[in-house]
Image: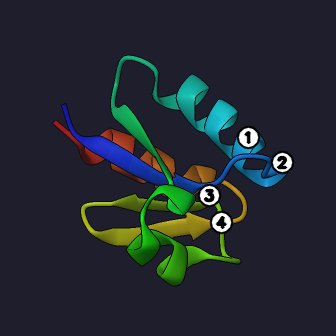
Amino acid sequence: MAAIEVYSRRGCHLCEVLIEELLELSRGRMDVEVRDIDSHSEWREAYDTRVPVVKYDGKVICQYHLDRNALARILSTDP
């Protein structure tokens, strides 16, 4: 099963809302990997003030708020 990566941090309200929404929409169709940017210096440097950032297949599909249309396209094309 393919995975969507979410770069987030603890205490981020936008992150919590996006992750909850993403998990609900992708349940059983795609894995969601939540990555705490404060656990890796490279992630923190790349995404510090931009969280949450959602990536799929190495590409950013949205940040701050879930792009439901982009997620729908991914879910409809992923085998």
Q: Eyeballing the image, is 53 above or below 49? A: above
Q: CA distance from mark 1 to mark 3?
A: 15 Å
Report x, y in % for residue 56: 34, 58
Q: CA distance from mark 3 to mark 4?
A: 14 Å
Q: Eyeballing the image, is 50 above or below 35? A: below
Look at mark 4 in the image and give the residue it sits on. Answer: 51
- Residue 13, numbered label: 2
Which element is circle 1 on?
Answer: helix
Which of label 3 and label 4 is nearer to you? 4
Q: Residue at x 52, y 61 (%)?
A: 37
Q: CA distance from mark 1 to mark 4?
A: 10 Å
Q: Quadrant of the N terminus?
A: top left
The answer to which of marks 2 and 4 sits earlier in the sequence is: 2
15 or 72, nearer to the observer: 15
Look at mark 1 in the image and give the residue it sits on. Answer: 16
- Disc 1 and disc 3 in contact, CB within 8 angstroms: no
Which element is circle 3 on?
Answer: loop
